[in-house]
Amino acid sequence: MAAACADPAAEVAQNTALIARDPVIARALHDPLMSDPDLASRNEANAAIGFVDSGALPVITASPEMASKAREALRLDLLERGSIPELPPPARGVASGQELGPLTSAAELLAAMGAPAVCENQLIEDFALAADLPRVAAIPPGAMVMQAGGANGETCGLRIIRYHSVAPPEDVLQYHYTEALRGGLRVLRFSKPEDIIAATGEGGETLLVHLRPAATGLSGVLVLYRAPSE
């Protein structure tokens, strides 16, 4: 636990240089420490969707230049389909009773969407589900999908997507806020316990977007979507 007190900036620079030389050896010698909350995904006891913790991918650092390019890509994508509404300030209150992070159980994710508990047994992991999202819940350009899962059915039309983005948090929120409005949903923005976009529509349609800082300056995003019942 004491290692968690190291200088984050210095550690990121060292990791990036090391992994650039030999990502496989770097992972063996310099694997992330248990102080990283994202390592909770390795313990799949309470995971809604699990995945094999894959190998040595290069570290991506959200530099100011990359963040600016990502922001521009998001705005251009939105402008191609209309004007961009102003992102409102956070409303008072909390969208859900808790943070929806790596330790959140399947039952808690379903409850946040208002989905029946029986849907838990129908959840599957499939990265193709990240490409099968309605426009109202679409992930932005350049998003790096980390996990994707969900369920199909009359009462269990669900999508659970975790992704990282180089774009600044405000621009990620702006993207999801705009898409939700264009999809005819009633949208609110919250800032506690996380940055949240919460939207609802007819037939129980629900969209929740939870955003928190991720490693190396990225924006970590959880998208929960429940399709309207037929």
Image (cartoon, rainbow, N blue to C red):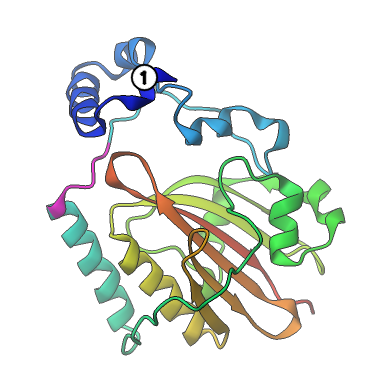
Label 1: how many Cα within 10 Å (few below 14, some 14–19, many 20+): few
Find the residue positioned furthest to the right. Answer: 118
* Image point (24%, 30%), residue name: 12
In this rendering, position of residue 123 left or right of residue 13: right
Quadrant the C terminus occupies: bottom right
In the displayed structure, 174 sits above or below 99; it is below
* Residue 172 is covered by the magenta coloring: no
In this rendering, position of residue 137 left or right of residue 24: right
Could you say whether the residue bearing mark 1 is in a helix, strand or loop?
helix
Quadrant the N terminus occupies: top left
Name the spot of residue 11 as percent of width and height, x first: 24, 26
Write down the region rendered in magenta: 60-64
Q: Which residue is mark 1?
A: 3
As rendered, which of 159 and 90 lies closer to the eye?
90
As rendered, which of 144 and 193 lies closer to the eye?
193
Find the residue positioned furthest to the left. Answer: 65
* Image point (72%, 52%), residue name: 108
Name the spot of residue 217 as percent of width and height, x first: 28, 45
* Image point (49%, 36%), residue name: 38
Amino acid bearing label 1: Ala
In the displayed structure, 81 sits above or below 175; it is below
As rendered, which of 152 and 92 lies closer to the eye?
92
In the displayed structure, 174 sits above or below 219; it is below
As rendered, which of 212 and 158 lies closer to the eye?
212
Q: Quadrant of residue 33?
A: top left
* Image point (37%, 74%), residue name: 174
Name the spot of residue 203 as percent of width and height, x first: 75, 82
Q: Quadrant of residue 156?
A: bottom right
* Residue 62 is covered by the magenta coloring: yes
Residue 191 seen in the figure: yes
